[in-house]
Amino acid sequence: MNISKSMVGDIAVIKLNGRLDLETSKTLKGLTKELMADNHNKMIFDLTDVDFINSSGLGTLVSILRDVNSKKGNLELCSLAPYIQEIFEITHLSSIFRIYENEEEALSSFAVTENKTE
Amino acid sequence: MEKHPLHYASLELNNSGLCIKITDDILKAFLELTSLDDREKYRLRVAVSEIVTNGYFHGNKQNAQKRMFFSCNVFNNRIEISVEDEGDGFNDDEVEEKYGAAGEYATGGRGLKIVEKVADRVKCGKTDNGRFRVSLLKYVNAEPVEAIGQSIESY
Protein backbone atom coordinates (compact mmCIF):
# COMPACT_ATOMS: atom_id res chain seq x y z
CA MET A 1 0.00 0.00 0.00
CA ASN A 2 1.17 3.52 -0.81
CA ILE A 3 0.18 6.35 1.45
CA SER A 4 0.56 10.06 0.74
CA LYS A 5 -0.22 12.84 3.16
CA SER A 6 -0.91 16.52 2.64
CA MET A 7 -2.09 19.18 5.06
CA VAL A 8 -5.01 21.47 4.29
CA GLY A 9 -4.83 23.92 7.18
CA ASP A 10 -4.83 21.69 10.23
CA ILE A 11 -6.51 18.79 8.45
CA ALA A 12 -4.40 15.85 7.32
CA VAL A 13 -5.59 14.50 3.98
CA ILE A 14 -4.29 10.96 3.61
CA LYS A 15 -4.58 9.26 0.24
CA LEU A 16 -4.44 5.48 0.34
CA ASN A 17 -3.49 3.42 -2.66
CA GLY A 18 -3.68 -0.36 -3.04
CA ARG A 19 -4.68 -3.02 -0.52
CA LEU A 20 -5.78 -2.36 3.03
CA ASP A 21 -5.47 -5.67 4.86
CA LEU A 22 -3.69 -7.20 7.84
CA GLU A 23 -0.22 -6.59 6.45
CA THR A 24 -0.61 -3.12 5.02
CA SER A 25 -2.79 -1.55 7.66
CA LYS A 26 0.11 -1.42 10.12
CA THR A 27 1.69 1.36 8.04
CA LEU A 28 -1.48 3.42 8.16
CA LYS A 29 -1.84 2.93 11.89
CA GLY A 30 1.77 4.05 12.37
CA LEU A 31 1.23 7.21 10.34
CA THR A 32 -1.87 8.22 12.28
CA LYS A 33 -0.11 7.62 15.57
CA GLU A 34 2.61 10.04 14.46
CA LEU A 35 0.02 12.60 13.43
CA MET A 36 -1.78 12.39 16.74
CA ALA A 37 1.48 12.62 18.63
CA ASP A 38 1.89 15.98 16.86
CA ASN A 39 -1.66 16.96 17.86
CA HIS A 40 -3.08 16.56 14.37
CA ASN A 41 -6.41 15.00 15.20
CA LYS A 42 -8.40 15.98 12.13
CA MET A 43 -8.05 13.57 9.25
CA ILE A 44 -9.56 12.66 5.94
CA PHE A 45 -8.83 9.29 4.38
CA ASP A 46 -9.25 9.41 0.62
CA LEU A 47 -9.93 5.84 -0.53
CA THR A 48 -10.16 6.58 -4.26
CA ASP A 49 -7.30 4.24 -5.09
CA VAL A 50 -7.97 1.52 -2.54
CA ASP A 51 -8.74 -1.55 -4.61
CA PHE A 52 -9.09 -4.06 -1.79
CA ILE A 53 -10.17 -3.89 1.83
CA ASN A 54 -11.12 -6.67 4.21
CA SER A 55 -12.11 -6.85 7.86
CA SER A 56 -8.51 -6.41 9.01
CA GLY A 57 -8.35 -3.12 7.14
CA LEU A 58 -11.76 -2.16 8.48
CA GLY A 59 -10.63 -3.03 12.00
CA THR A 60 -7.68 -0.70 11.60
CA LEU A 61 -9.94 2.12 10.42
CA VAL A 62 -12.18 1.56 13.45
CA SER A 63 -9.15 1.55 15.74
CA ILE A 64 -7.97 4.86 14.27
CA LEU A 65 -11.48 6.30 14.58
CA ARG A 66 -11.52 5.36 18.24
CA ASP A 67 -8.11 6.98 18.78
CA VAL A 68 -9.19 10.15 16.98
CA ASN A 69 -12.47 10.33 18.89
CA SER A 70 -10.65 9.92 22.18
CA LYS A 71 -8.63 13.04 21.27
CA LYS A 72 -11.82 14.90 20.33
CA GLY A 73 -10.74 14.92 16.71
CA ASN A 74 -12.47 13.87 13.51
CA LEU A 75 -11.88 11.19 10.93
CA GLU A 76 -13.80 11.40 7.67
CA LEU A 77 -13.69 9.00 4.74
CA CYS A 78 -14.23 9.91 1.12
CA SER A 79 -14.30 8.58 -2.42
CA LEU A 80 -15.10 4.93 -1.77
CA ALA A 81 -15.62 2.72 -4.80
CA PRO A 82 -19.09 1.11 -4.75
CA TYR A 83 -17.73 -2.36 -3.95
CA ILE A 84 -15.67 -0.97 -1.06
CA GLN A 85 -18.72 0.90 0.21
CA GLU A 86 -20.67 -2.37 0.12
CA ILE A 87 -18.20 -4.00 2.49
CA PHE A 88 -18.81 -1.11 4.92
CA GLU A 89 -22.52 -1.76 4.63
CA ILE A 90 -22.27 -5.54 5.10
CA THR A 91 -20.33 -4.92 8.31
CA HIS A 92 -22.59 -2.04 9.41
CA LEU A 93 -19.64 0.32 9.57
CA SER A 94 -21.32 2.87 7.37
CA SER A 95 -23.23 3.84 10.51
CA ILE A 96 -20.17 4.88 12.51
CA PHE A 97 -18.08 6.49 9.77
CA ARG A 98 -19.03 9.66 7.96
CA ILE A 99 -18.45 8.91 4.32
CA TYR A 100 -18.34 11.62 1.66
CA GLU A 101 -18.47 11.54 -2.10
CA ASN A 102 -15.19 13.38 -2.53
CA GLU A 103 -12.44 15.23 -0.72
CA GLU A 104 -14.07 18.64 -1.13
CA GLU A 105 -17.21 17.48 0.64
CA ALA A 106 -15.17 15.94 3.41
CA LEU A 107 -13.19 19.17 3.85
CA SER A 108 -16.42 21.16 3.93
CA SER A 109 -17.71 18.98 6.75
CA PHE A 110 -14.92 20.21 8.99
CA ALA A 111 -15.98 23.80 8.39
CA VAL A 112 -19.55 22.87 9.33
CA THR A 113 -18.37 21.07 12.45
CA GLU A 114 -16.24 24.04 13.50
CA ASN A 115 -19.09 26.47 12.90
CA LYS A 116 -21.33 24.35 15.10
CA THR A 117 -18.83 24.32 17.93
CA GLU A 118 -18.15 28.07 17.79
CA MET B 1 -22.80 -32.20 -9.61
CA GLU B 2 -19.70 -32.36 -11.76
CA LYS B 3 -16.82 -34.04 -10.04
CA HIS B 4 -13.93 -32.71 -12.08
CA PRO B 5 -13.05 -29.04 -12.03
CA LEU B 6 -12.27 -27.07 -15.17
CA HIS B 7 -9.46 -25.32 -13.38
CA TYR B 8 -7.83 -26.06 -10.09
CA ALA B 9 -4.91 -25.07 -7.91
CA SER B 10 -3.58 -26.51 -4.70
CA LEU B 11 -0.92 -24.81 -2.65
CA GLU B 12 1.02 -25.45 0.52
CA LEU B 13 2.32 -22.20 2.01
CA ASN B 14 4.51 -21.22 4.90
CA ASN B 15 2.40 -19.45 7.46
CA SER B 16 3.01 -15.74 6.94
CA GLY B 17 1.10 -12.60 6.16
CA LEU B 18 2.09 -13.12 2.54
CA CYS B 19 -0.42 -15.98 2.37
CA ILE B 20 -3.18 -13.39 2.18
CA LYS B 21 -1.75 -11.69 -0.90
CA ILE B 22 -0.60 -14.88 -2.63
CA THR B 23 -3.93 -16.66 -2.30
CA ASP B 24 -5.79 -13.52 -3.35
CA ASP B 25 -3.66 -13.17 -6.48
CA ILE B 26 -4.40 -16.78 -7.44
CA LEU B 27 -8.10 -16.48 -6.69
CA LYS B 28 -8.28 -13.22 -8.66
CA ALA B 29 -6.78 -14.93 -11.70
CA PHE B 30 -9.17 -17.87 -11.38
CA LEU B 31 -12.19 -15.63 -11.03
CA GLU B 32 -11.37 -14.11 -14.39
CA LEU B 33 -12.22 -17.54 -15.81
CA THR B 34 -15.74 -17.40 -14.42
CA SER B 35 -18.87 -15.54 -15.41
CA LEU B 36 -19.25 -13.86 -12.02
CA ASP B 37 -19.66 -10.11 -12.32
CA ASP B 38 -17.05 -7.75 -10.90
CA ARG B 39 -19.03 -7.13 -7.74
CA GLU B 40 -19.34 -10.83 -6.95
CA LYS B 41 -15.70 -11.43 -7.77
CA TYR B 42 -14.68 -8.73 -5.36
CA ARG B 43 -16.98 -9.95 -2.60
CA LEU B 44 -15.64 -13.48 -2.98
CA ARG B 45 -12.02 -12.27 -2.83
CA VAL B 46 -12.79 -10.43 0.41
CA ALA B 47 -14.52 -13.49 1.90
CA VAL B 48 -11.60 -15.77 1.07
CA SER B 49 -9.11 -13.26 2.43
CA GLU B 50 -11.06 -13.36 5.70
CA ILE B 51 -10.67 -17.13 5.90
CA VAL B 52 -6.96 -17.02 5.06
CA THR B 53 -6.38 -14.17 7.52
CA ASN B 54 -8.16 -16.12 10.26
CA GLY B 55 -6.05 -19.18 9.48
CA TYR B 56 -2.81 -17.25 9.56
CA PHE B 57 -3.61 -15.10 12.56
CA HIS B 58 -5.96 -17.09 14.79
CA GLY B 59 -5.48 -20.68 13.61
CA ASN B 60 -1.73 -20.79 13.11
CA LYS B 61 -1.23 -17.90 15.54
CA GLN B 62 1.32 -16.24 13.23
CA ASN B 63 3.66 -19.14 13.85
CA ALA B 64 6.09 -19.24 10.92
CA GLN B 65 6.73 -22.95 11.51
CA LYS B 66 3.16 -23.79 10.64
CA ARG B 67 1.67 -24.18 7.18
CA MET B 68 -1.41 -23.15 5.31
CA PHE B 69 -3.10 -25.23 2.62
CA PHE B 70 -5.16 -23.53 -0.04
CA SER B 71 -7.14 -25.04 -2.87
CA CYS B 72 -9.37 -23.53 -5.48
CA ASN B 73 -11.53 -25.52 -7.86
CA VAL B 74 -13.51 -23.87 -10.62
CA PHE B 75 -16.39 -25.88 -12.06
CA ASN B 76 -18.89 -24.91 -14.72
CA ASN B 77 -21.45 -23.79 -12.21
CA ARG B 78 -19.56 -23.23 -8.97
CA ILE B 79 -16.31 -22.41 -7.26
CA GLU B 80 -15.06 -24.39 -4.30
CA ILE B 81 -12.32 -23.02 -2.11
CA SER B 82 -10.79 -24.58 0.92
CA VAL B 83 -8.29 -23.23 3.42
CA GLU B 84 -6.64 -25.40 6.03
CA ASP B 85 -4.46 -24.31 8.91
CA GLU B 86 -2.71 -26.26 11.63
CA GLY B 87 -4.61 -24.69 14.49
CA ASP B 88 -7.56 -25.71 16.62
CA GLY B 89 -10.25 -23.70 14.89
CA PHE B 90 -12.61 -21.20 16.44
CA ASN B 91 -16.06 -20.89 17.79
CA ASP B 92 -18.55 -18.07 17.48
CA ASP B 93 -18.84 -17.65 21.25
CA GLU B 94 -15.14 -16.86 21.57
CA VAL B 95 -15.37 -14.24 18.82
CA GLU B 96 -18.43 -12.71 20.48
CA GLU B 97 -16.72 -12.70 23.87
CA LYS B 98 -13.63 -11.00 22.48
CA TYR B 99 -15.29 -8.33 20.37
CA GLY B 100 -18.97 -8.21 21.32
CA ALA B 101 -18.70 -5.70 24.14
CA ALA B 102 -17.28 -2.97 21.91
CA GLY B 103 -20.31 -3.20 19.62
CA GLU B 104 -19.95 -1.21 16.41
CA TYR B 105 -16.59 0.08 17.58
CA ALA B 106 -15.04 -3.39 17.86
CA THR B 107 -11.77 -3.68 15.98
CA GLY B 108 -12.45 -7.28 14.93
CA GLY B 109 -15.05 -9.99 14.58
CA ARG B 110 -16.43 -8.93 11.20
CA GLY B 111 -14.69 -11.44 8.96
CA LEU B 112 -17.10 -14.31 9.50
CA LYS B 113 -20.07 -12.04 8.88
CA ILE B 114 -18.63 -11.18 5.48
CA VAL B 115 -18.01 -14.86 4.71
CA GLU B 116 -21.55 -15.85 5.69
CA LYS B 117 -22.99 -13.03 3.60
CA VAL B 118 -21.01 -13.79 0.46
CA ALA B 119 -20.79 -17.57 0.32
CA ASP B 120 -23.59 -19.86 -0.75
CA ARG B 121 -22.28 -22.52 1.59
CA VAL B 122 -19.54 -22.62 4.23
CA LYS B 123 -18.36 -25.61 6.19
CA CYS B 124 -15.66 -25.81 8.79
CA GLY B 125 -14.16 -28.36 11.09
CA LYS B 126 -11.23 -30.63 11.80
CA THR B 127 -9.88 -32.88 9.07
CA ASP B 128 -8.71 -36.45 9.57
CA ASN B 129 -5.10 -35.28 9.64
CA GLY B 130 -5.77 -32.79 12.40
CA ARG B 131 -5.87 -29.60 10.40
CA PHE B 132 -8.71 -27.11 10.62
CA ARG B 133 -10.49 -26.64 7.31
CA VAL B 134 -12.88 -23.99 6.12
CA SER B 135 -14.57 -24.72 2.79
CA LEU B 136 -16.53 -22.19 0.85
CA LEU B 137 -18.81 -22.82 -2.09
CA LYS B 138 -20.09 -20.17 -4.45
CA TYR B 139 -22.47 -20.89 -7.30
CA VAL B 140 -21.64 -19.18 -10.54
CA ASN B 141 -24.83 -19.49 -12.56
CA ALA B 142 -28.52 -19.50 -11.73
CA GLU B 143 -28.28 -21.34 -8.48
CA PRO B 144 -30.55 -21.24 -5.46
CA VAL B 145 -30.66 -17.68 -4.22
CA GLU B 146 -32.23 -18.83 -0.96
CA ALA B 147 -28.96 -20.57 -0.10
CA ILE B 148 -27.15 -17.23 0.20
CA GLY B 149 -26.40 -16.12 3.71
CA GLN B 150 -26.59 -19.53 5.34
CA SER B 151 -24.85 -20.05 8.62
CA ILE B 152 -21.55 -21.83 8.78
CA GLU B 153 -21.91 -25.60 9.03
CA SER B 154 -19.62 -28.02 10.77
CA TYR B 155 -18.13 -31.10 9.23
Image: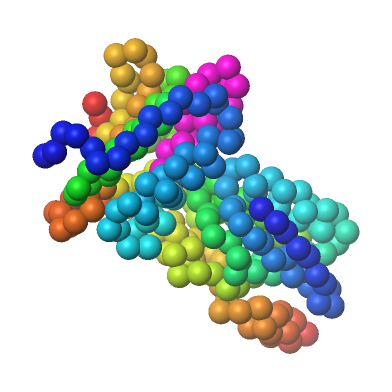
Task: Name the residue located 59 percent from the left edge and 43 percent from the top edge.
Answer: A22
Q: Position of residue B37 (x, y in %)?
A: 32, 63
Membership of B40 in magenta stretch: no
Q: Position of residue B107 (x, y in %)?
A: 56, 47
Q: Quadrant of the C terminus of chain A?
A: bottom right
Task: Name the residue located 52 percent from the left edge and 30 percent from the top edge.
Answer: B56
The residue most toward the left is B1
Task: Name the residue located 56 percent from the left edge and 66 percent from the top edge.
Answer: A97
A83 vs A107: above or below = above
Q: Is residue A55 visible?
A: yes
Membership of B54 in magenta stretch: yes
Q: Is residue A74 visible?
A: no
Of residue A52 and residue B13, the one placed in the foreground of this image is B13
Task: Name the residue located 19 percent from the left edge and 34 percent from the top edge.
Answer: B4
**Direction from residue B100 to residue B155 in the image, left or right:** left
Which stretch is magenta?
A: B47-68
Q: Quadrant of residue B94?
A: top left
Q: Position of residue A65 (x, y in %)?
A: 65, 59
Of residue A103 and residue A40, the one placed in the foreground of this image is A103
